[in-house]
Amino acid sequence: MTHILALDQGTTSSRAILFNAQGQSVRTAQSEFKQIFPQPGWVEHDALEIWQTQLRVLKDVLTPAATTDSVAAIAITNQRETTVLWDRQTGLPLANAIVWQDRRTVEHCNALRQQGHQTFIQEKTGLVLDAYFSGTKLAWLLDNIPGARTRAERGELAFGTVDSWLVWNLTKGQAHVTDPSNASRTLLFNLHTLAWDDELLALLRIPRSVLPTVMPSSGIVAHTDPSLFGRAIPIASMIGDQQAATFGQACFEPGMAKNTYGTGCFMLLNTGHQPVVSQNKLLTTVGWQRLEASAQPLATTYCLEASVFMGGATIQWLRDGLNIISSAAEVEALAASVPDVADTYLVPAFTGLGAPIWDGNARGTLIGMTRGTTKAHIARAALEAIALQVADVFDAMAKDSGIALAELRVDGGASKNDLLMQMQADFLGVPVVRPNVTETTALGAAYLAGLAVGLWSSTKDIATQWSVDRRFEPSMASADRDAKLARWHQALERAKGWAS
């Protein structure tokens, strides 16, 4: 058994990737699924469709049968915070999953803030009080589905982020589990005790009976039901997508950072075995938890995280909303056809602003247009907006950690865009380093599963497999960089608070 099968359940698609012992992808399958927007600010997924697409691509990769026999373990990484509530008896969801991007609980968060709970919540969870996280989404489901709260209190319902939902279905209801990286994104998990917190549960009125058991990120947590693949395959890792990408980027030492350019942009900095409290509106989160080689008790790695809601989704908007490109790949050439943005700025606050501003009432703004503005200027402004948002969180992360970050490792689909990566290096003033394997989310989960079943012996083995594809050096003068950031911050001010 020389392969790990990684399930990468993302915001817009489900993927399965088969990795060999060299950390190379040998087979991949992917299936997009429907995005549901019931009303402005609401984003939902059909949880059954998530499972069906994930099972389909999993089976596509496990063909022929000989491939199944080579799989040592299954690894799971997932879109975080997306909230599923289902019936333990039937296994059916009670409603659509509420996606991490969804803003329907902004007012609930505002009320908790006005009641003075923000500091209390941040001290316990490491999170800011925002509709982004799962806790208020779960509370909304319990309050708005008829009879759900009563049924939850009777122990008839199960809550989970997408990792829990997949394991439940892979085991046909035999395992209801999550890991600390996902649990730490719920507003219900205490970073210091590494357990569900009774005070937080009481504050959000969440019955403990709906919660999954918290298991290590790396370790055999369950086995698949034999009827699915002809034999029971160990499920040996569960980890949130951004923490998985950090592990896949071999950011094993404190002070190492990566940024993933997916639907959103997510920068994580390894801070070691102690949580670092943010003073700049960043998040403190569990990176991963695993048994160290010396067989000592479980070691927990923490990270500082900055979450930008609109990364690659900004390019999707150019394609699907404005129809100025027909595919995401076209944006680089279109943006490169003009030398600059001609003082046009796009603030892609379509679902509010994340770190380091956290304004749920901010909305998308396109400013500075003249009669000479073209779709090329807007495309270039969209790319700049992604890089400028990342520059802001990079600065906040350096302030919080006290570390002058020497480089930024990058991954995710949009990291393949050379123009965007050069913009990023220019706006940061440090090199941007793209590895040969940019799909590091699935790879990180695969590494954690492989460590659990002995396919790799240590993180040192894994670090030797990481290699550089291209290094982007900054070429912008510092005065020009400062002027660009100042103008961007002016544009941000005009987007804040619009929906209020």
Image: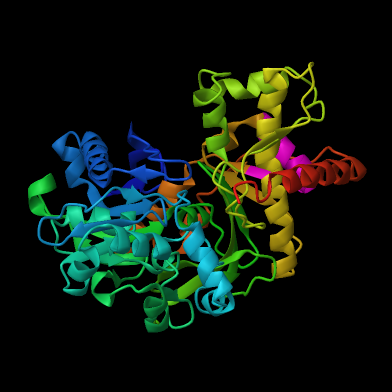
For the point 48% across and 51% down, the residue is 103
The location of residue 165, given as percent across then percent down, is 26, 55
How was this image coloured? rainbow
Considering every residue shown, the one lying at the far right of the view is 479
Q: Is residue 410 depicted above or below 181 in this figure?
A: above
Q: Based on the displayed image, in which of its 4 quarters is residue 138 positioned?
A: bottom left
Residue 422 shown in magenta: yes
Number of numbered discs on residues? 0
For the point 57% across and 26% down, the residue is 318
Q: Is residue 301 depicted above or below 423 in this figure?
A: below
For the point 80% across and 26% down, the residue is 340
Magenta segment, principal secondary structure?
Answer: helix
The location of residue 28, given as percent across then percent down, is 34, 35
What stretch of residues is rendered in magenta?
419-433
Would residue 10 be seen by someone viewing this image from the given angle? no
For the point 13% across and 45% down, the residue is 229
Task: Pick the residue in front: 268 or 374.
Answer: 374
